Amino acid sequence: QLQLVESGGGLVQPGGSLRLSCVASGFTLDIYAIGWFRQAPGKEREGVSCISRSGGSTNYADSVKGRFTISRDNARNTVYLQMNSLKPEDAGVYYCAAARDRPFSSFCRALPRDNEYVYWGQGTQVTVSS
């Protein structure tokens, strides 16, 4: 059974940090690009970040550039999203998603839309509040 599971969400004060994890089971992540998305109540789901299969290419939404860092450990079948200097507007449910990626592809050159991903996790809640 192919599955992505997010973890690491929680309640944090503005200016704080969280590290989200996305673990795959039932398949290996090393041939997939991984994206992080978020959805706040009443808003559309938006792309946050993308990382290529090798980790050599990453991309971020303008709203998180300089604060969030995406990384991956293919040996652990895990992708991370380090979130620093969190703001209330960063709150929402965060999802990771996987898409087959070819070597040296340009999949993450621009933030892919959600319909370009095949597998999705169930999400983890991030709340930023004092």
Image (spheres, grey):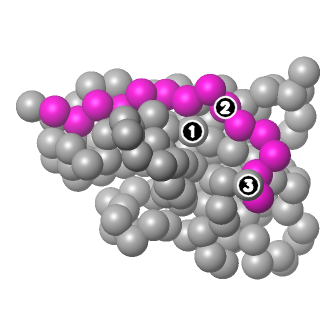
In what quadrant of the picture does the N terminus appear?
A: top right
Residue 75 visible? The answer is no
* Label 2 Cα crowd, 10 Å radius (few <14 / some 14-19 / many 20+): some
In what quadrant of the picture does the C terminus appear?
A: top left
The amino acid type of the residue labelled 1 equals Tyr
- Decide: is 116 above or below 42: below
Label 1 residue SS = strand
Locate residue 119, reporting x and y percent.
78, 40
Residue 12 visible? The answer is yes
Q: Write down the quadrant of residue 33 in the picture.
A: bottom right
Q: CA distance from mark 1 to mark 2?
A: 6 Å
Which residue is labeled 1 in the image? 95
Q: Are marks 2 and 3 in contact (CB under 8 Å)?
A: no
Q: CA distance from mark 2 to mark 3?
A: 14 Å
Which residue is labeled 2 in the image? 121
* Label 3 Cα crowd, 10 Å radius (few <14 / some 14-19 / many 20+): few
Label 2 residue SS = loop
Left or right, 94 with respect to 29, comes to left
Which residue is labeled 3 in the image? 115
- Decide: is 38 above or below 53: above
Can you tell which of label 2 and label 3 is closer to the viewer?
A: 3
Locate residue 109, reporting x and y percent.
66, 78
Left or right, 27 with respect to 55, comes to right
The amino acid type of the residue labelled 3 equals Asn
Locate residue 115, reporting x and y percent.
73, 55
> Which numbered disc, 1 or 2, marks the residue that appears first in the sequence?
1
Residue range in magenta is: 116-129
Q: Total marks drawn?
A: 3
Q: CA distance from mark 1 to mark 3?
A: 13 Å
